[in-house]
Image (cartoon, helix red, strand yellow):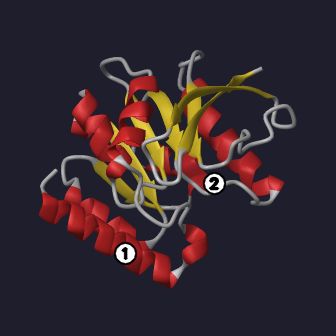
C-alpha cells in the first residue's frame, strides 16, 4: 500500500474515532501483520465467500486480498456510514454492504450470497451485552453451517489477553490461533468452532 493510502486510512480512522470512539476497537487501524495473521487462518475454497464483520478502514480486507482471496468473493459488512462509504470506494470489486452484523442472515439472503468459508469479526465485542455477542455468533455460524459448510468457523481478533467471547456459554470451543506482537496494541486471533 502506498504511503498516501496509509495516510488516508489513518485520517478516516481518526475521524471515525472522534465521532464514536466506542464503535472502534482500537486507537489506530490494524497493522498489516495482524491482517496477514488473520488471512493465514482463513479457510476458503473456490466458490465460497469470506465475510468480514466490521470492516473499519479495510486493513484486514487488504490482507485477505494480498493472501489471494478474490476481491469478488469478499463480503464486508460495515454499519458506520463514513466507514462504509470509504470501504465501498476503496474496494469497488468487493461487495461492501452497510448493515447490522446481528442481522447477517438477512443481509446475505438479500444479496444472494452462497456458501461462506469463514466469518471474520473485527467488532469490539469485549464488554458488550451477552445478547449482542450471541447474535453475532449465531448469525456468523448460521451463515456457514446453514449453507452447507459444516467445517466453518469464526475468527475474532481482539486486544484482550483472554478470549473475547464466552465460548462455553455460547456453545462453542475456542483456541488462540495467533498472537501478533507487531500490532499496536498487540492482538490475538481467536478461532471459534461449534462444540
Q: Foreground: 128 or 104?
A: 128
> Which disc, if any, is residue 102?
2
Query: Which residue is under mark 1?
Result: 82
Q: Are marks 1 and 2 in contact (CB under 8 Å)?
A: no
Camera sees residue 20: yes
Apparent side of residue 172 relative to residue 69 in the rendered image (left or right): right
User: Looking at the image, which is closer to me, 148 or 159?
Assistant: 159
Q: Is residue 141 above or below residue 152?
A: below
Q: Is residue 140 left or right of residue 80?
A: right
Q: Residue drawn 54% across and 44% down?
A: 187
What is the x, y in percent for residue 137? Answer: 68, 41
At mark 2, the secondary structure is helix
The reply to whether residue 69 is visible in this rendering is no
Q: Which of labels 1 and 2 is toward the front? A: 1
Question: Which quarter of the picture shows residue 113?
Answer: top left
Q: Quadrant of the C terminus?
A: top right
**Horizontal placement of 75 versus 148: left or right?**
left
Amino acid at each position: 500500500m502506498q504511503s498516501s493510502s496509509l495516510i488516508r486510512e489513518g485520517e478516516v480512522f481518526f475521524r471515525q474515532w472522534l465521532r464514536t470512539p466506542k464503535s472502534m476497537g482500537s486507537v489506530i487501524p490494524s497493522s498489516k501483520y495482524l491482517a496477514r495473521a488473520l488471512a493465514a487462518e482463513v479457510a476458503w475454497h473456490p466458490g465460497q465467500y469470506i465475510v468480514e464483520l466490521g470492516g473499519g478502514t479495510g486493513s484486514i480486507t487488504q490482507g485477505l486480498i494480498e493472501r489471494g482471496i478474490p476481491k469478488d468473493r469478499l463480503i464486508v459488512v460495515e454499519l458506520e456510514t463514513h466507514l462504509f462509504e470509504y470501504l465501498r470506494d476503496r474496494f469497488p470489486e468487493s461487495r461492501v454492504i452497510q448493515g447490522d452484523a446481528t442481522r447477517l442472515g438477512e443481509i446475505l439472503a438479500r444479496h444472494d450470497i452462497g456458501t461462506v468459508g469463514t466469518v471474520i469479526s473485527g467488532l469490539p465485542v469485549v464488554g458488550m451485552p451477552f445478547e449482542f455477542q450471541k447474535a453475532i455468533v449465531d448469525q456468523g455460524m448460521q451463515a456457514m453451517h446453514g449453507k452447507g459448510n459444516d467445517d466453518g468457523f469464526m475468527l475474532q481478533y481482539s486486544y484482550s489477553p483472554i478470549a473475547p467471547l464466552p465460548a462455553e456459554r455460547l456453545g462453542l470451543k475456542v483456541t488462540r490461533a495467533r498472537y501478533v506482537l507487531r500490532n499496536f496494541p498487540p492482538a490475538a486471533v481467536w478461532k471459534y468452532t461449534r462444540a
